[in-house]
Amino acid sequence: MKPNAQLFKGSLTTIILKLLQEEGRMYGYEITRKVKEASSGTLQLTEGALYPALHKLEAEGLLTVTVEASGNRPRKYYSLTPSGKKEVANKVAELQAFIGQMQSLLNLKPGIG
Amino acid sequence: MKPNAQLFKGSLTTIILKLLQEEGRMYGYEITRKVKEASSGTLQLTEGALYPALHKLEAEGLLTVTVEASGNRPRKYYSLTPSGKKEVANKVAELQAFIGQMQSLLNLKPGIG
DNA sequence: GTTAGATGCATCGGTTTCTTAGGTATATAT
DNA sequence: ATATATACCTAAGAAACCGATGCATCTAAC
């Protein structure tokens, strides 16, 4: 039983955009580490979920990529495009509103109805 | 753009269990109304998502059904089984912990990195 | 020297979950 | 007659995610 290990449906892209807004630019592997670290290991963002999401965001024009050979192996740094920067605020606001609604459903006291 | 209309992946069953814990017993159509009402119309729980979820929870032994002809048309009232009552606390706690992690990711300030 | 583990990219198959659309049936309102 | 509300349900398809796997490089262990 590990349903808590998976991200909210449709929220992964929002998380990615938010992290890029925060950090400026990141590469894929770094994002997986960041999510794991920021959630104390609770949220495990698998690469099988991340990379398709990154490619999709890039195809939608929200992200750009710059490849850099960082001493060792090449890294693909992702950063927000102008339209990506606009989208962040919207998506984050949507997700937060949504979380608020979820909490109002979860915070009802049992046996009162 | 209506990603905010959908429930978190895997959270629908938790919401159902929570509502039944709160209300004692409910029928399907009533649950859809309740979610819509409690979220001011933000969350729309479609029947195509609800009924399969209810049947699955019943098959897992977390819910029981009693059919009642309530004046007009027959209703299927769902309520928690003993094991369902145990599961509610766990699932709600999991989801709340998860929401907390999501918020900590979303509440980071932009441009600081 | 070769095995293991970390970094760093990526795809593929399968499963679950949700959406969209439709179906059945009764009652009420227009 | 037609639309809306109640009340149940399924089925097809899309979407998202998980787990496994693959390639390649570098470092550390033994």
Image: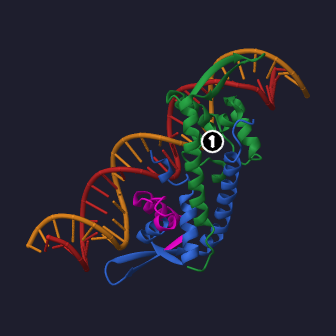
Chain colours: A blue, B green, C orange, D red
Query: Could you tell whether B97 is left or right of D5 in the image?
Result: left
Q: Could you tell me the amino acid type at mark 1?
A: Ile
Question: Hey, which quadrant is residue A83 in on the image?
Answer: bottom right
B71 horizontally vs A75: left or right: right
Label 1 chain ID: B
Query: At x 63% / y 74%, what residue is drawn?
Result: B109
Closest to the observer: A81 or C2?
C2
Residue A62 appears in the figure: no
What is the quadrant of residue B91 in the picture?
A: top right
- Front position in the image: C30 or B66: B66
- As for residue A47 lying within the magenta part, the answer is yes
Count of picture labels:
1
* D24 to B50, vertically: above or below: below
**Residue D29: horizontal and vertical position, in percent?**
19, 72
**Residue holding disc 1:** B15
Counting from the top left corner in percent of width and height, residue B104 is at: 59, 65
- State the residue in front, B47 or B94: B94
Q: Is residue A72 above or below residue B79?
A: below
Q: Is residue A68 above or below residue B37?
A: below
Judged from the image, the secondary structure of the residue bearing numbered disc 1 is helix
Q: Position of residue C7 (x, y in %)?
A: 35, 73
When asked about the image quadrant of residue B22, the answer is top right
Q: Quadrant of the C terminus of chain A?
A: top right
x then y, percent, for residue C17? 53, 42
Residue interval drawn in magenta: A36-64
